[in-house]
Amino acid sequence: MGPNFLKSFARHFLSFIFPPLCVRCGLRLKNEGMLCESCRGQIQMLVPPYCFRCGQALFSSLCACSIEWPFVFSMVRALSPYNLIMQDLIRLFKYEKFSRLGFLLAELLGQVVDKKFFEKVDFITTVPLHHSRLRERGYNQSQLIGEILAQKMRIPFLSFLLKRRRKTISQTKFNRQDRKKNMDGVFQISKKGREILRKFQQGTVLLVDDVITTGATLNACAKILLEDGAVGEVRVAVLARA
């Protein structure tokens, strides 16, 4: 018996003793993965036709964002609405240390987003965590998404571009106006990030996060990048939009 046979036997034996379960509902899985067919089927992926700017489903030729666009970033794409299934999956991914879920969700995001959205993107970066939160969680969920997207799309990834100047209270505790105030002066470009930006000259950045609600956090990050002068455009990609 060769080593491959022993590895296969061990894998099947462990699967029999400890069968893989869906991380959301606990149902026994028929195949390798993290979600059962039912839970995966509930992910309501945002596919075309959608608005080229805001990424929302388009039911007519005119989108509401053409009348008012309160952001400095140019466009948004999301995998899904922030419905019950996505709330559960992002909670597991973000707070319950199911980091492997990030690979599945980022892969799905890369599949549903139109390829034109990634055109002319010079590099991908993410909304940074404060170092104290990073210690608590063990990883930055947005960075994991960004790294997978960058690998899939063959675009350079910069994890160190932005940093938080101070720790903030969770945005979930605030209304729209207070969320904006909570983000004032929070982000800055790192010293190493400034050195990198000098090479791009009006480049296009793809900014990645897990959820967009009011857009206050992402807009604050985009403002800092655009104010520096080296970045000409900021686009946004998220797992879910509220």
Image (cartoon, rainbow, N blue to C red):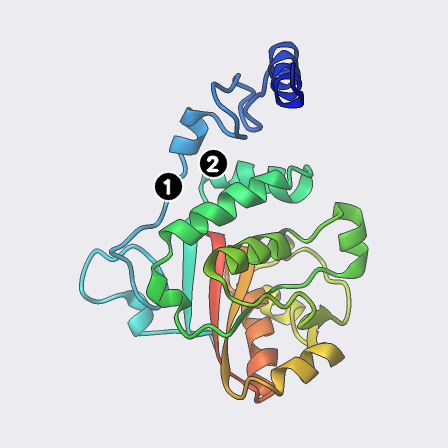
**Crowding near pointer 2: few (<14 within 10 Å), some, many (20+)?**
some
Of residues 8 and 196, which is closer to you in this image?
8
Camera sees residue 59 = yes
| Place of residue 180 in the rendered image (x, y in percent of width and height, measured from the top left) | 59, 69
Question: Residue placed at 63% from the left, 57% from the top?
Answer: 143
Q: Which residue is mark 1?
A: 44
Q: Which mark is residue 85?
A: 2
Kindly identify the amino acid type of the residue bearing the numbered disc 2.
Answer: Ile
SS type, badge 1: loop
Assign a secondary structure to mark 2: helix
Q: Position of residue 88 (x, y in %)?
A: 54, 36
- Residue name at image x 60 percent, y 15 percent: 12
Which mark, residue 34?
none
- Residue 225 percent across, percent down from the top left: 59, 79
Instruction: From the viewer's side, name the closer residue of 202 and 79.
Output: 202
The part of the image, by quadrant, that contains residue 170 is bottom right
Label 1 with label 2: CB-CB less than 8 Å: yes
Residue at image position (27%, 54%) is: 48
Residue density around tag 1, few if under 14, some if 14–19, many if 20 or more, within 10 Å: some
Q: Tell me the kind of residue under disc 1.
A: Gln
Q: CA distance from mark 1 to mark 2?
A: 9 Å
Say which label, 1 or 2, has the lower sequence index: 1
